[in-house]
Image (cartoon, rainbow, N blue to C red):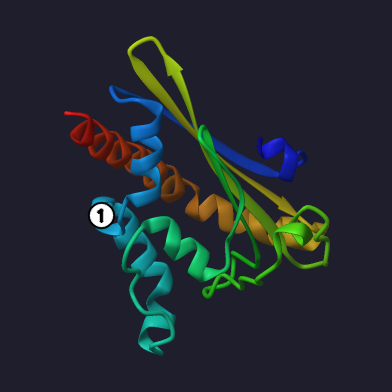
Amino acid sequence: MLDDFLPRYDFNEVHSVAIGASPAAVMDAIRSLTPTEVPVLIALMAIRSLPALLRRRRPPVRGPLLDGFRDGGFVTLREAPDELVLGGVGRFWEPSGGLRRVAVAEFGEFAEPGFAKAAFNFQVERHGERTLVTTETRIATTDERARRRFARYWRLVHPGSALIRVAWLRAIRRRAERSSN
C-alpha cells in the first residue's frame, strides 16, 4: 500500500523476516515494541540526536517505538489488520531532521521545494505456519537540490538504517513469538 502514498520515490530499502506467530500477534508486536527492544536503534539515534539532547530539546522516547515517530512528526497514513504505514516530511539530512508536521491529507501532494517525504510500512502475510513481515522505506525528494542533499546523507546513513530495520524486525519476531507461547 505504499504505492497509495509514495508511488514514485528516489530511494528505498526493503527487509523481511518470517515469524512463528499469527498475523494478529505480529501486528500487536509491531504496535507495542519499545525502543529498549532495539538497542542498535537507541545507539544510532542517540548519535543523530546528540545536538538536540545537549540542548534538551528532545526527551528520550518512552512507550511504543512508533509513538516516538508520531511524536517526532510522522503521521499514520494507513492502519489495517495486515499493514501499518507511517509518513513524514522533513530535511532528514539536517541534524534535527527538519521535520515538518503535515496532515495525512496533505502528505501525498506535498511538493514544497527543499524537502523529502519518507514513508515506511510493516506488512504481514500468512504463509503456512509462519507470518512474513516486510518493511519497506521509501523516500521521495521534492526537487533536485533536495535529492542531491538526501543522496549524500543516504550514502552515510544507509548502512545504519538497514541495520536498524533488521534489528527492528528481529525484535518484532522475539516479542510476537514470546506472546504466542
Establish if 127 lies above or below 144.
above
Residue 20 pos. (x, y %): 28, 22
**In the displayed structure, does residue 180 sit left or right of residue 47?**
left
Give the residue drawn at x 59%, y 64%: 92
Q: Nearer the viewer, residue 150 or 17?
A: 17
Which image quarter: residue 147?
bottom right
Q: Is residue 77 left or right of residue 177?
A: right
Quarter of the image with the C terminus is top left
User: Residue 7 appears at what percent x and percent y?
Assistant: 76, 39
- The amino acid beneath tag 1 is Pro
Q: Residue at x 28, y 41 (%)?
A: 171
Relative to 30, residue 88 above or below: below
- In which quadrant of the rendered view does residue 51 lie? bottom left
Residue at horizontal 72%, vertical 45%? 5
Q: Position of residue 178 (x, y in %)?
A: 19, 35
Q: Residue at 38% x, 57% y: name it.
A: 65
Question: Helix or strand or loop: what does disc 1 sit on?
Answer: helix
Q: Quick check: 7 left or right of 12?
A: right
Residue 114 visible in rendering: yes
Residue at the top extreme of this rendering = 128
Quick one: quadrant of the N terminus?
top right
Q: Is residue 9 visible?
A: no
Q: Residues within 10 Å of mark 1 (few under 14, many from 20)?
A: some
Q: From what the image shows, is residue 27 above or below residue 153?
A: above
Which residue is under mark 1? 39
